[in-house]
Image (spheres, rainbow, N blue to C red):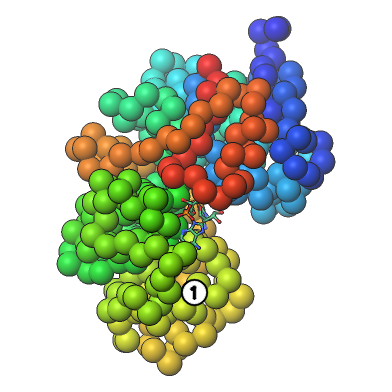
């Protein structure tokens, strides 16, 4: 392969996993304030397969494009004015979200501050599993809900990519954590520190759970309205990571706040997340890895919606 080219996963049209193809394309160049990162591993997220199916990023970008936001890799070169990193530094991050980042590729460029130093104790596969899911959990629970010690936090889809990290971030804040997941995943979640678990296939969580301070909502449909019924009147907060159609029924009557949060690149939160990892208080579970050229299989596995933890592409 020529020196200035690279392998990437590209799609020309909306569709199923089969539209994802390996192509040879131009290697990007870092602009002013940007780093060029050699990607060692790229995490997969539901937003990737939703974008693939729609054939459009939420910023309006249309095919051909390369999916992927989660990167762990090594700085290959730096652009004009960059002092934060130098070639050889190991970094991880969620560059450019929600604009295309092109992480399913051998190289990405991005603004320097969309990356942070990779947690030294993690390999690239585990570091690539963290950024988008952990930033989402952090920005929902810490920045938005401001979870306090002793508060009761209900986390939906607790075994998923976001959920299993949210359980641990809430525990690290000193909260009492209740999660929803099917029974087969309860052992996994107890090991991560969950205090109480509801098998949503057997029990209506809205009947089983009471006096909650904060709900992290990740399912959609009637979940926001049902979750509001579990919140403490007057002080409860519901943070949804799925868009909601207008006000949540029941929220105003109960005097609780409910809102949607879209994750953002944030190197400071990434450093806090890395510190939790190094303290042994945040573990990321990688359910399965696939090589870059098997991105279609990785999407098919993720789209089952049954993942415990994350799926990651190995690149370098
Ligand atoms: N707003 C944002 O910025 C943002 C950021 C990240 C993610 N998201 C969105 O948040 C959602 C979750 O993301 P993710 O990465 O965590 O997804 P994921 O890893 O694919 O979630 C899979 C998990 O969902 C669980 N699940 C499915 N239905 C459930 C239900 N009714 N109750 C409880 N658990 C259920 C499954 O557990 P079981 O096998 O036990 O069902 C599985 O463990 C996605 O829709 C994603 O697009 C939004």
Identity of the residue drawn at 74% across and 28% down:
21
Q: State whether residue 262 is above or below residue 151.
A: above
Where residue 251 sits: x, y (%)? 45, 84
Number of dots carrying numbers = 1
49 horizontally vs 260: left or right: right
Q: Residue at x 55, y 67 (%)?
A: 220
On the image, numbered disc 1 is attached to which residue? Answer: 224
Residue 278 vs 215, above or below: the answer is above
Task: In the displayed orientation, state which residue is furthest to the bottom.
Answer: 253
Q: Is mark 1 within 8 Å of ligand 1?
A: no
- Out of 99 and 82, give the one closest to the viewer: 99
Q: Look at the image and tell me whether residue 37 can be seen.
A: no
Quarter occupied by residue 255: bottom left
User: Residue 274 at what x, y percent from top left?
Assistant: 30, 37
Q: Tell me: 189 left or right of 220.
A: left
Residue at the location (22% across, 43% down)?
Answer: 281
Q: Nearer the viewer, residue 67 or 81?
A: 67
Q: Label 1: state its secondary structure.
A: helix
- Residue 240: image x %, image y %? 47, 66
Position of 26 relative to 94 (above/below): above
* Residue 226 appearing in the image: yes
Characterize the local packing of mark 1: few (<14), some (14-19) or many (20 or more) Cα atoms within 10 angstroms.
many
Task: Give above or below for 310 relative to 243.
Answer: above
To which quarter of the image does residue 126 belong? Answer: top left
Nearer-the-camera pick, 313 or 132: 313
């Amino acid at each position: 392969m020529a020196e200035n080219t690279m392998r990437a996963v590209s799609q020309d049209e909306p569709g199923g996993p089969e539209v994802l193809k390996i192509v040879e394309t131009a290697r990007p160049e870092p602009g002013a304030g940007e780093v060029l990162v050699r990607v060692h591993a790229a995490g997969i997220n539901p937003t990737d397969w939703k974008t693939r199916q729609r054939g459009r990023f939420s910023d309006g970008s249309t095919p051909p494009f390369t999916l992927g936001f989660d990167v762990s890799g090594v700085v290959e070169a730096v652009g004009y004015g960059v002092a934060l990193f130098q070639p050889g530094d190991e970094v991880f991050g969620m560059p450019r979200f929600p604009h295309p980042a092109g992480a399913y590729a051998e190289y990405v460029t991005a603004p320097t501050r969309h990356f942070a130093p990779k947690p030294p104790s993690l390999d690239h596969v585990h570091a690539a599993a963290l950024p988008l899911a952990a930033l989402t959990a952090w920005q929902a629970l810490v920045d938005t809900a401001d979870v306090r010690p002793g508060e009761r936090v209900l986390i939906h889809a607790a075994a998923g990519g976001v959920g299993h990290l949210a359980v641990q971030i809430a525990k690290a804040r000193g909260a009492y954590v209740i999660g929803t997941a099917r029974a087969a995943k309860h052992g996994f979640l107890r090991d991560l520190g969950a205090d109480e678990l509801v098998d949503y296939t057997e029990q209506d969580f809205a009947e089983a759970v009471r006096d909650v301070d904060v709900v992290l909502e990740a399912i959609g449909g009637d979940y926001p309205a049902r979750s509001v019924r579990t919140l403490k009147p007057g002080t409860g907060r519901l943070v949804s990571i799925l868009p909601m159609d207008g006000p949540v029924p029941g929220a105003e009557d109960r005097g609780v706040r409910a809102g949607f949060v879209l994750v953002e690149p944030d190197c400071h939160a990434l450093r806090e997340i890395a510190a939790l990892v190094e303290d042994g208080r945040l573990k990321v579970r990688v359910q399965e890895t696939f090589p870059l050229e098997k991105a279609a299989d990785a999407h098919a596995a993720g789209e089952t919606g049954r993942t415990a933890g994350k799926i990651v592409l190995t690149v370098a």
